Image: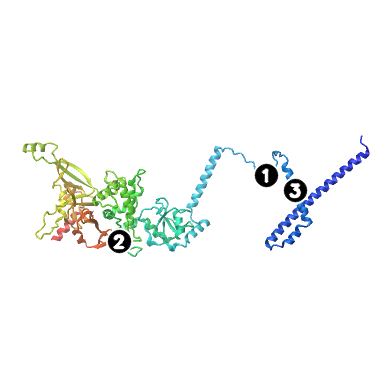
Amino acid sequence: MMSHRDDESSSSRRTHDRDRDRERDRHDRDRMNGRDHRERDDRGKDRKRQRSPERPSAKRGRRDASPERRSSRRDDNRERDRDRRRSRSPRRSPEPGEVVEGASKVEDKPVERPLTAREIARQKLLQEIEEQERADESNAPMWTMKKAEAEKASRNCPYLDTVDRAVLDFDFEKLCSISLSHVNVYACMVCGKYFQGRGMGTHAYTHSVDTNHHVFLNLQSLKFYCLPDNYEVIDPSLSDIKFVLKPFYKTEEIEKIDKNTRMSRAFDDTRYYPGIVGLNNIKANDYTNVILHALSHVPPLRDYFLREEDASLKRPPGDKLNLLPKRFGELIRKLWNPKVFKAHVSPHEMLQAVVLCSNKRFQITKQSDAQEFMLFLLNTLHIALNGTKKTSSSIVYRCFRGKMRVYSRKVLPMDADDSQRRAMMESDEFSESVEEKPFLYLNLDLPPPPLYRDELLQNIIPQVPLGVLLARYNGSTEKECKTYNENFLKRFELTRLPEYLILTYQRFEKNRYFMEKNPTIVNFPITNVDFYDCLAPEARETHKYTTYDLVANIVHDGPPSDGHYRMQVVHQATGKWYELEDLHVTEILPQIITLTESYIQIWRLNTKKTRVERMGEEEMDTV
């Protein structure tokens, strides 16, 4: 057993240890509080030192030598020693849930479970509702504050005065002038050049930054943007630029085209009639210009493309023929535009489509025959417009297609005697056959030019009336047609007259050595040319109207290999005749038309008076 003295000594030791621990804890707390106060004082002094000039080093040295500073240094040294001893002790792995001091706290990630079918269906339904709300918001009226602010910013573009309409030309191919890309092309409204893209780093953006040009037009969406700020520009003063790029016509405007007698004024102050404008000759494409101009003055064909009815037609994917009616329609809409910037049009895009669809048979840099190009264009347009063998299948057949009856019989050989001739004529091989054929044009043969000069040693230019040439189709005149080893005699008569009749004159003939041109002048009236004698007897009763008026006359001047084309066309509203030769447009007298070497003509069926009424008026005049 322990004695009472031992108990007292043990209790006194415990009391002493407890007092010592309390004294140590109080000392630690005081030391920590003093350290915090010193750190706050040091931070305050640093801020004052930054705001005030630096004090002399002597005062700083005396302050460092103060007893408080020395005691703080000793405390810092003790702390470093304690940390050093702790770092040498072996580390234990933290228990679960224990927060390790100095380590970042890692949050427990929840385990993702797969969604059920009900939750997936719910998410799809919510996505559809959100998309519908966004669509409704985009289609809703511009009444929200956000849209109103965006519209206000778009209408206050400070660079609209930099738009230069004199340099704008939308007739060329829509491709970037740097990357030669057709995708996302913009036109600079200041210099007229084409660039790709609108975002940062694109050619349009770089051009805007380098040249300080800001207003651009998207050639596909017809929207204006300001770069490099990249916001849409909405201003009604830019609507004329959109109309020049992509003209559109209402039904009322199309009906009044042939009744408008008022001249339009271009932006360059040139006065012109819509449709009577020049076509640019890029190098050697005058043979295409005259055909395109002549076809653009056929009202049913013109109105068809002005209404853009070809846009609803569908062709197989990758069909290149779809490009030809598209470019042809764009060209016609530009030719009849009453609000142009310049009174001429460049058929650059149309000619590129021709080169592509004809497999380079017709080119821009090489002269070709206008008659061959006309046949290619009409047949290709008919196929591209989903035409068939029926007359009503395409606008081309409805305008130009007629029908004729062909009688043909084989020529008897010259060395056969009379008995052999009689036997051959009774056989089926040499008997006359009849065939119904459609046609898009009628070809007329010219008489050969004189072989010798006259007594004054001058070449005589022969002349022939149009009625003499039309006798070929009266059903009684036979024409010899030669093949490789056989000869046939054929005669023709018409069974159906088209609304627009195309006549071609056989001026070029190839001999053994070179191409020869026939300079014979054809005399014809420009109105009331009667085709009654060319109709078959049974067809004369069904045709009330048989007279035609001239619409366009295509002329070839010069030698066959180095000549050029020009055309004369009538303005339907005023009745005036104009001559177009590339970019040159001049008014002419109707009497001059018959003095030219006509090559191709387009005639319009006159439906104002029937043949019976016209014959009655002529009889009254003679009386």
Residue 103: numbered disc: 1
Q: Secondary structure at mark 1?
A: loop
Would you name the residue on which mark 2 appears? 273
Would you name the residue on which mark 3 appears? 79
Which of discs 2 and 1 lies nearer the camera? The answer is: 1
Q: Residue furthest top?
A: 1
Which of discs 3 and 2 lies nearer the camera? The answer is: 3
Place of residue 439 in the rendered image (x, y in percent of width and height, measured from the top left) = 22, 47
| Nearer to us in this view, 257 or 106 | 106
Quadrant for residue 270, please give it.
bottom left
The amino acid type found where label 3 is placed reads Glu
Residue 85: numbered disc: none
Place of residue 356 in the rendered image (x, y in percent of width and height, measured from the top left) = 32, 48
Image point (34%, 63%), residue name: 266
Q: Secondary structure at mark 2?
A: loop
Establish if 532 lies above or below 623: above
Residue neighbourhood size for the residue with mark 2, other residues' Cα within 10 Å, grouped as few (<14), some (14–19), many (≥20): some
Q: Mark 2 or mark 1, which has the lower sequence index?
A: 1
Question: Is residue 328 visible in this depiction of the protein?
Answer: no
Q: Secondary structure at mark 3?
A: helix
Q: Quadrant of the C terminus?
A: bottom left
